[in-house]
Amino acid sequence: MSATDPSPETRWAQVLAAFGAGIVGAAHVGKVPAAIPALRAEFALDLVTAGWVVSIFSATGILFGMAAGLLSDRLGQRRIAVAGLLLLAAGSALGALAESGLTLLWTRFAEGMGYIVAVVAAPSIIAQAAAPADRRLAIGLWGGFMPAGMGSMLIAAPFLQPSIGWRGSWAVMAGLTLIWAGIMAWAFREDAGRAAASALPEHPWRNMRITLKARGPWLLALCFGCYTLPWLALMVWLPTFIVEQRGLPVRLAAWLTVAAVLINLPGNILGGWLSHRQVARGLVLAVAGAAIVTAGPLIYLEILPDAGRFAVCLLYSFIVGVVPAIVLGAAPWFAPGPGQIATTNGLIVQGSHLGMLSGPPVAAAVVGLFGGWQGGAVVFAACGLGVLFFAALIYREERRLAVLQGSSDRGPAK
């Protein structure tokens, strides 16, 4: 989050409007998994190409994460967030009219552009709207936008698609996103002049260079990517696995996936609480890495009965839920200085979206290479080891920064 002027009191309507923008954006990720069977049938998509329907949404995060942060600071977070929602709505509406797989991919890219702009702007909006006493709580609320939005759409999709099809789901999401853009504009109606008069960043490209030269932002971004890759891959392909490999009904598969996604949310809350209790971030991330390595074989190999494998899915998703809260909350501490906090957040978003982009197609490719879903265990092992590696480096960086600051818990960059 960028440095902000203290608010005398928390403007909760604005906090909730920004949080809702993240939820709406994440719902555009959640609308795809239940639609994959229909998309594959209509457009004759293979498993890898279907994975790109999910992952192309994240390509813009990799390409434009830091740039979106700079643009948000320069033009104002409120207007940029509203513009992002409008673009997201337009992409979804055009996707509902797609006549080919290629056209659908392009509309998903447009959706991704809108999404990244909105979610990069939202944390700064929340920080500006929250009073100092409420800022930890407000930012902690933001950490749960992905499971809340994705899970909500996974719940709704099984009811929407049998009656209105995947195209109807796309159209409904376009309408809801357009409505939320209006809600955001209403929530910030009194701040329009203030947003236009906000100070411009003095040296945006210099801030970017400083951020890219620092160790801390890179460690957070790469660790986040190692978390998002296996988590999103599992949640995207879980309905397909349950239906095609276990022979269970589509609606039951959707509900089981919803449970696995939503249980990530209390993990986010736990991560925020551990951060508030000043537990070393590197240690918390190491526990998450160990959970990823351990869960892979138990989920993908024929070691446990189906009920046991699903229980491992739930436990895994809960434990690794600490990662977003720890990583996103660490940006002010690991940024080179106050002028680089926004670009640090942008780099973290890019790392996250690198994992989101590559997760579904990489998992699909490895499954194809191994000739079965047991290949997913390899993906989990590699990513879990990556989280453990970066957790160790983050722990060392924490200790180094603590010595520099003369405190066991380094405060935000000053």
Image: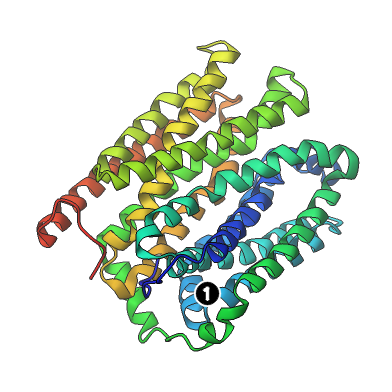
Q: Secondary structure at mark 1?
A: helix
Instruction: Report the residue at 10% width, 56% height from top.
Output: 403
Observer-nearest residue: 391 or 328? Answer: 328
| Residue 48 x %, y % | 66, 42
Residue carrying label 1: 77
Q: Quadrant of residue 217?
A: bottom left
Farthest residue, direction front = 9
How many C-alpha atoms fall within 10 Å of the one at disc 1: few (<14), some, or many (≥20)?
many
Q: Is residue 205 visible?
A: yes
Instruction: Report the residue at 43% width, 51% height from top.
Output: 140
| Residue 373 x %, y % | 59, 25
Q: Is residue 221 visible?
A: no
| Residue 340 x %, y % | 33, 72
Q: Quadrant of residue 116?
A: bottom right
Please give left or right for residue 322 compared with residue 236 in the image: left
Observer-nearest residue: 210 or 189? Answer: 189
Instruction: Report the residue at 45% width, 37% height from top.
Output: 267
Rendered view: 368 above or below 179: above
Instruction: Report the residue at 70% width, 58% height from top.
Output: 108
Please give left or right for residue 281 compared with residue 61 in the image: left
Picture quarter with the C terminus: bottom left
